[in-house]
Image (cartoon, rainbow, N blue to C red):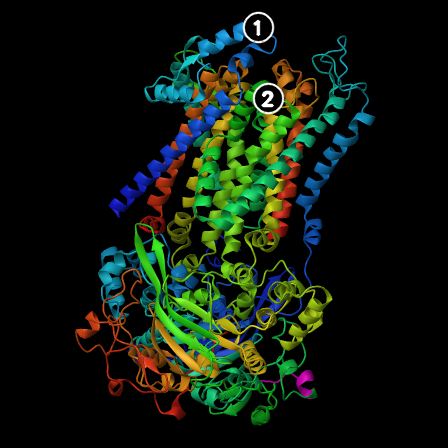
Amino acid sequence: MTDRARDASAPALHLDDLSVAYTVRGRDLPVLSNVGLTIERGEAYGLVGESGSGKSTVALALQRVLPPNGRISGGHARVAGKDVMELGTAALRKMRANDVAMVFQDPGKALNPSLTVGRQMAEVYEILGASSAEARKRGEAILGRVRISDPGRVMASFPHQLSGGMQQRVVIAMALAKDPALLILDEPTTGLDATIEAEVLDLVDTLRQEFGAAVLFISHNLAAVASLCNRVGVLYAGKLVEEGPARALFADPRHPYTAGLLRCLPRAGFKGGPALDNIPGFPPVPGSITKGCVFAPRCGLAEDRCRSEEPPLYDVGEGRGSRCHFHDRIDDLPRMSEPPPVNTPERGPDVQPVLMLERLSKTYELPGNRQVQALRDVSLTLNPGETLGLVGESGSGKSTLANLILGLAEHDEGGAISLDGTPVAASVHARPREAIQAIQIIFQNPDSALNRAHTVKHLIGRAVERLAGITGAKRNTRVTQLLEAVRLTPRQLPAKPRQLSGGMKQRVAVARAFAADPRVIVCDEPTSALDVSVQSAILNLLSELQAERQVSYILISHDLGVVRHLSDRIAVMYLGRLMEIGPAKSVLTGPHHPYTEALLSAAPTVTGERGTRIRLEGQIPSPVNPPSGCVFHTRCPRKFGPICETEEPGFSADTEGHAIRCHLDRSEMGRGREMKGVEIVEANG
Amino acid sequence: MKSLFGRFLLRRLGLSLLTLWLVSVVVFLGAQVLPGDPGRAVLGPLADARAVAALNKELGADRPPVEIYLSWVGGMLEGDMGQSYAYRAPVAPFVGEALLRSLKLVGVIFIIVVPLGVGAGVVAALNVGKPIDRIISVASLSLTVIPEFVSAIALILVFAVILRWLPLSASWPDGAGPLVQIEHLILPALPLVIVLFGYIARMARAGTIEALSSDYTRTAILKGLPWRTVLIRHVLRNALVPTIAVIAAQTGYALGGLVVVEALFRYQGIGNLVLSAAKAKDFAMLQAGILTIGAFFVIATLIADCLTVMLNPRLRAELGK
Amino acid sequence: MSATSDGAEAATTSPPAPAPTMRKERTTLGILMRSPAFLIGAAIVLFWAFCAAFAPYFVPYDPLADDLLNTLAPPSAAHWFGTDQIGRDVFSRVLVGARDILTIAPLATLLGTVLGTIVGLVMGYFGGWVDAIVGRLIEVMLSLPLIIVALMVLVALGPSTPTVAVVVGLVFTPLVARTVRAAVLSERHLDYVPAAAVRGEGALHVMFVEILPNIWPPIIVETTVRLGYAIFTIASLSFLGFGVQPPSPDWGLAIAENYGVLVGGFWWTVVPATVATASLVVGVNLVAEGLQRAVAE
């Protein structure tokens, strides 16, 4: 810690009963009510909550940059001892220039597209009184401190010329340049790839100690918060429901909402491990609950008292607080949902695979006679009732592979797709109805995948009609059956998507995919657009439907927790190639491909443990000019000789069907941490 | 970067030439092929068939269309715009003189409307939802759709007939200095200023609002920069680039409006030339005039595209792709 | 979204999304009914539509009947708006004058919208070379001012009411197509399009059943905006002598016939038609603006 942090007596941030209201169509909606928290100098504080909980509003309010319809309706916010409510225009500007800095979610948008990075960097120093030459020099210096190796070049660049990870470093450098007392990070890694995310989190952690700045880290990602923060506050419907030291809070929650969230997270264990629970119902509309506890309608412990008497912030010891009358009875919180049955697929040589891909490649033509190979030589099989997890960062070819399987894009000559042993055409338009109905998809974002002009009845009915060929009254019966299978009711039939919640919409999308007894469903990030509490319900639904109908899933996800929870087998892709494939247990415990090893170690855990992290250097190469030899050699921490650069490694499987594309001997490859300690979790909302 | 821009310019120039060529085809089809029998169109349904044939021969209209087109385009490339039927004289000098007059008028229009429109748009954006924004928004919205001849009548009535502040005639005495010329051009310019004001103000307003609500503007505010710096360096720079393209597109539109205004004020510009050629069925003149207007528009958009690309680093980078 | 100019509070974010539940939808009509601008616009348009339909049955004079003994008479109890150069009653002419323009302009708009929607859908959906070629043609059409293209074609074909409607409709087609294409492109990347493909739907189904229902709001707005410009363009053409032909009491024509005597002080021959034209275009535009806002909400 620096001297400054030690000397200053006032806390970096002190919120005292802060309330914020937005005026929407003439009505005041309380978005934050009576939030009180203190961040000491040099401390890292995590604020977690699902969408709509008001966590970003905290950051905006304390800098007085609320949108025009928002206002601080009560309480105080003190940054480094100064009450921001009482500052005049000049003093407020000075506070922003000196004391507080903020990093937003999307670094690409936070940088001015028409100014060079250098210009934007220098501004921060100029406002503090530096000459322009000095400002440039200090700008370059601070870029060096955020581990940018070529500050001169970055200073001369425009933001769009930098990668997402690099942009985020620039934004962080810009924030740290003023040596602020408080650094606010609002979802700083959402949208970044796992390995880049790990890098940014590491960087923030190191810099925090170097600069001695206090950090307010706002995130829906419990694991990221756990890995970075000393203390954590949990926001629900604009109220701080629980607060305490990060480890203790996640290990032993004292509020039913926190406990419920943790039960929704896919944590330890493989497919067939502990079942996920969920939190029924929806967060309340701001201001709709005026009496009692805001969480009571969804709480398994709620009694009459909870509905009439608002719980105060009980002191529950060790610097912890909980807004629950029954904070000492959290262990009694019942399961809120039935654990779903889990399917165990048959394996063995005599089982005929439902889907077989042989040497699938996809080449796109670019202007100027260039080509890009989005997918290269992928072969794999999928057994009935099996789930294959597909992981890899952006540009790895996961989506291309999905499109080829579905026939939305046509694979190159020389590849083959067969369904139940019968070859199928490359294009969906050339496939017979039976082949089309057999392979379906659940998209990431139901808002995009469901046509908002149509009703639920039409959305599912049309699929039944086209895929199963059922019409008339029978069609309606079938639609109702499907709705019930995904735990919706016929009441939702006339609704249009926008009248449904995110979880309900995704259920409609699931029902549509199951319209005509599919054999294979591609699940493309099926839960990453959803809040944690909704995500678990969808995952349980997928498990249940699989056990019931013996359908096979190809699960694409960047969330290793989700993949681990559902997959029988896992495939790891990089730059259009399959790098590793095998039974989930073997892939996750090792021996690993070096890339898999890096991916696994990049994922933070909710217990806050930080094992030896393997960090990847450099950026994902362009698929237009893939590296020679092993495509991973440019970033590989275990590259051991020229052979990696010249020769593409083979891809042979061991007896369990675990194949790794690497020149290393298996005995030299990394292995997973001890099974008990492994908790690869990334909660996504 | 330089060579990238060079390549872009070359490609864009090629596209402009392609557009221009297609415009020439459209104009040719419209003025030569569509009427069917130009001689008949000129002389009317009652004329003697021999007279029609003779006229067609004189006009060169008895040849196959492709041949007529080729000789027309060939002539154009050599600066020969053909012979006017009405004046029995080469077309080119008429077109040149008329274009020059119209450019003067367009110049006056844009000198007035660009600062006015951009200024009003920015002021409205900075006061979104307040009365001043409402007034500017409703005004720009309503003024844009008023036909030039309608507002011209009102302006003439007020400024020339009642107040007598401005001369009614657009034509200035021979040998008049630039100030006198401008004085004569203000009244004819105003109807188009009124129409264009709305377009430019709305575009500037939308661009400014978008920039104001952007994350980078918020970042700039949170750096503690003075509001003036935020506004000029971060907001307006990004907000006004798209407006350039709109201004260029409206140049073309303005040339259309010139037909009405020049007719109303009896100003011998390119619009009036096209109109009188149309009324006289002087097809050579009509063709040349319209093609000139098309060429003017193509050049204006070309310049605007280049400016937009030069001012926007992101677009500049995309050139390479 | 907005920002204030004092700098202190100038920054914006989206307001919090209300919690997801089964929500009641706010109807577009409800929003419109509370917009004064829309209501004023609609009242103006309805007034002129009423005149266009019924004015001939109640105006005091035959709008075509001249009265050479009573030319250029100033407004009086007998002739509320005076008489024109050949003694026709200006008041009667202005009311009946709505008829031609309110027949031709909607027809032209309808034609332009239907054709433009089809062209735009095809361009946006198929993309590639279809889009490139049609796009180039549209750019060519738009590089000549609309009124000049219309003028050129009307000179060739001769001005008649149906010709004017068809020509203006065709001239508007590329403009509508451009708007529709942009709307299709923003739909095209949504996953419901591939979702339709994986159940084997054809191009026609995707274009007209999946995409079209989602882009009707911009199309409706575009239609009203186009209607305003159709009136603008047709009035200008009539003024230039290439639109509605004499002896119709059409406003543009009336202004063209009489503005020469304006300097003589006979303002009543021109001003009523001027005000009528201005009020109609502004009225249509207020309706368009109201729709646009309602759709955006």
Quadrant of the rendered image containing residue A593: bottom left
Label 2 and label 1: CA atoms lie apart by: 26 Å
In the foreground, B24 or B9: B24
Question: What segment is highlighted magenta in the picture?
Answer: A305-312
Secondary-structure class at tag 2: loop
Residue A344 rendering spot, x and y as whole percentages: 50, 86
Q: Is residue C66 above or below residue A325?
A: above
Residue A169 shows up from this direction: yes
Residue under circle 1? B48
Q: Residue furthest left?
A: A642
Residue C112 rendering spot, x and y as whole percentages: 59, 37
Q: Residues within 10 Å of mark 1 (few under 14, many from 20)?
A: few
| Residue at the image position 46 percent from the left and 45 percent from the top | C131
Q: On what subunit does the disc labeled 2 rest?
A: C
Secondary-structure class at tag 1: loop
| Residue at the image position 56 percent from the left and 37 percent from the top | C173
Determine if the magenta segment contains residue A95.
no
Disc marking residue C242: 2
Residue A316 rendering spot, x and y as whole percentages: 52, 91
Q: Residues within 10 Å of mark 2 (few under 14, many from 20)?
A: many
In the foreground, A382 or A318: A382
In the foreground, A308 or C217: C217
Q: On what subunit does the disc labeled 1 rest?
A: B
Quadrant of the rendered image containing residue B99: top left
